Amino acid sequence: MNSQLPDRAVVLLVVLAIVIVFSLVFSLKPKVQEQNDSIQWRDTPLEQSSSMGIKL
């Protein structure tokens, strides 16, 4: 029950885990083109009204 893994195997497992995490993060990250298509900018701003009642 007291069998230990060699240092080389532990380092290999840590590196493999880091590679798996980074590959999942970058494969699930939305592409820039897909993200820009969903944003719809207005050409002209809405009418600015001073009816907020804020006076200095």
Image: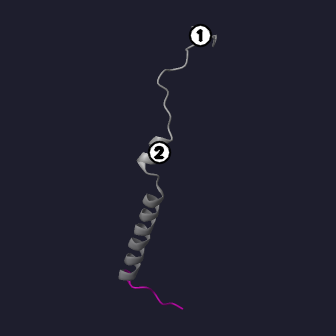
Residue 50's disc number: 1
Q: Give the residue type at disc 1.
A: Ser
Residue 2 lies, in percent from the top left, at 51, 90
- Of marks 2 and 1, the one in the foreground: 2
Task: Single out the residue that lies furthest toward the left.
Answer: 8
Residue at 48%, 90% in the rendered image = 3
Q: Neighbour class for label 2 at 10 Å: few (<14), some, many (≥20)?
A: few
**Is residue 15 found left or right of 54 in the rendered image?**
left
Q: Decide: marks 2, 1 in contact (CB < 8 A)?
A: no
Predominant secondary structure in magenta? loop
The magenta segment is 1-7
Using the image as rendered, state which of residue 8 and residue 29 is in the foreground.
29
Residue 21's disc number: none
Residue at 55%, 15% in the rendered image = 47
Task: Relative to 23, say whether 30 is above or below.
Answer: above
Residue 13 lies, in percent from the top left, at 42, 76
**Is residue 42 found left or right of 16 in the rendered image?**
right
- Which image quadrant: the C terminus? top right
Q: Earlier in the sequence, mark 2 or mark 1?
A: 2
Using the image as rendered, state which of residue 56 and residue 27 is in the foreground.
27
Q: Give the residue type at disc 2.
A: Gln
Query: According to the image, label 2 marks what residue?
Result: 35
The number of numbered badges drawn on the structure is 2
Residue 9 lies, in percent from the top left, at 39, 82
Residue 51 lies, in percent from the top left, at 63, 11
